[in-house]
Amino acid sequence: MLFRSLTSFLRFIVELTLAGRSHEIKGLTVATQALGRKESFDAVRDPTVRILAGRLRAALEHYYLAHGSKDPVLIEVPKGAYVPIFHDLSAKKRRENRSVPVSVQASERDKPLGPAIAVMPLINLSGEPEPDYFSDGLTEEMIAEVARYPELRVIALHSVMKFKGMTVSAGEVGRELSVRFLLEGSVRREGSRMKVAVRLVDTTTQLQIWGEQYRRDFTVGNLIHLQEEIAARVAARIGGLYGIIPQKLSTEFRGRPPETLETYEALLCFHRYTMSLTESLHRETLESLERQHNEDSELGMLWALLAVLYADANTLWLPRPKATMERAVAYARKGVTLEPQNQYARTVLAYMYFLVGERDAFFRETERAMALNPNSPMHIGFLGWTMALYGEQERGISLLERGIELNPYYPGWFHAGPSLLHYGEGRYENAYEEADKIRMPHILWDPLLRAAILGRMERSTEARDALISLLELRPDFPANARRLLGYFVKNGAQVDHILEGLTKAGLTL
């Protein structure tokens, strides 16, 4: 009976992941679709799925130490989550590690680069036992959601549950679990309403660096939905490229010479760069990541981020000899080959296909990237931005708005996409309203959009001023206008439409 349950469990999560539907893997779906439980199954009160997941992890470890030691692929079910990870084990790697436990067989590239975080058991402040089921379930759900962000090392549920009911300081927990950050909070039920308060604490200073409250209507029927929704929102605010944690850490390394930075610190330089998109930070970040690339060439994420920097050298700044679009695409493909389950790598490959005009490949990679974490604000927002520019306007804008809603700390260039769409439809007032929100005059798309829009609106003086700013940034723009526009504008008639607006602003081609 146990063997049959474990087999069904494993088959279900593997098949859904391979089908690009990993976002559907939850305690409830495992119970009802893999284990044959009724739809009324309560994943909070009934620990069956969690217990089986633990036994499945142990069974897989035993299998790969014995009968599966020569298998070309290793399947791992990370603690705190049910979505499997597939590791490609080369023959050489298997020979080197045949006697090494599975827990250390994974390549260095599979280990999170960034800081460790512990999601502490939420405290029930209601004075009733019933909300304990909700708070424990929400704690587990938050662990699973935060674990979706590959740069964070998340402490497993069993390691944090021992602190339930204890009064300990953030510093004590940080030292015992070796974590930089704690995510803690409380749950209070007031009649039919549930209030969840969550805060992020830096264990080195014991100071709260972020906090938020969620008030929701509570019924037995929507309990699982509430846990999933709140957990996704919390994880989205703290993790990912634009989350609270990289914001906090990026300030600590600001101003340090590139040659002194470790790998994760170099990645934080990339965070600063994407928020500001200045040419000086482009050079600094490129130097930092290329230095790390020589030392950590097995990190798929490093290849992917270098691909973005090489592409930006062509699409935003004056091209560099080494930074060709061909190299950018090749690096992005290498990143996915090394880390096929890394959402950054998948998103970057989709972006490269977008830039070079491989439409089918772009949409294929976009779906794969979003399936890895459909709640990551940066990824769904950025991919929605590119989808909208590639003609899928309704879905693309919906995803972009969803990304902004999940985490309002987003870069100004997100507004360039909606501005272009409004411009293409002749809604120049709306286009200008979006362009005005970019507020990044040092990148060519800010003055470019303003010049074209204002030219169409016959606001000649303002249009001319914007055009002057554009030409100061890119004196070579008249000679390269179609190429630069074509990276992002996929319709030839739309390119002509923009050039006509720039001509009205005074541009001579």
Image (tube, rainbow, N blue to C red):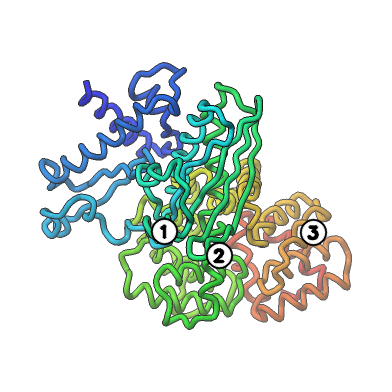
Q: Residues within 10 Å of mark 1 (few under 14, many from 20)?
A: many
Please state which of the two labelled residues, at mark 1 or mark 3, is closer to the viewer: 1
Image quadrant where residue 117 sits:
bottom left
> Foreground residue, 364 or 231?
231
Numbered disc 2: secondary structure: helix
Q: Which mark is residue 248?
A: 2
> Residue 99: horizontal and vertical position, in percent?
11, 54
Query: Residue tagged by mark 3?
Result: 432
Which is nearer the N-term, disc 1 or disc 2?
A: 1
Q: Residues within 10 Å of mark 3 (few under 14, many from 20)?
A: many
Q: Residue furthest front?
A: 167
Task: Confirm or deny contact between disc 1 and disc 2 (CB under 8 A).
Answer: no
- From this view, report whether residue 442 is shown above or below residue 229: below
Residue sitting at x 58%, y 75%: 317
Numbered disc 1: secondary structure: loop
Q: Specify the quadrant that holds the C terminus.
A: bottom right
> Residue 314: horizontal and vertical position, in percent?
54, 72
Task: Confirm or deny contact between disc 1 and disc 3 (CB under 8 A).
Answer: no
- From this view, report whether residue 36 is shown above or below residue 353: above
- Taking the image as shown, residue 100 lies to the left or right of residue 384, namely left
Residue sitting at x 60%, y 70%: 277
Please state which of the two labelled residues, at mark 3 or mark 2, is closer to the viewer: 2
Q: CA distance from mark 1 to mark 2?
A: 15 Å
Query: Residue tagged by mark 1?
Result: 179
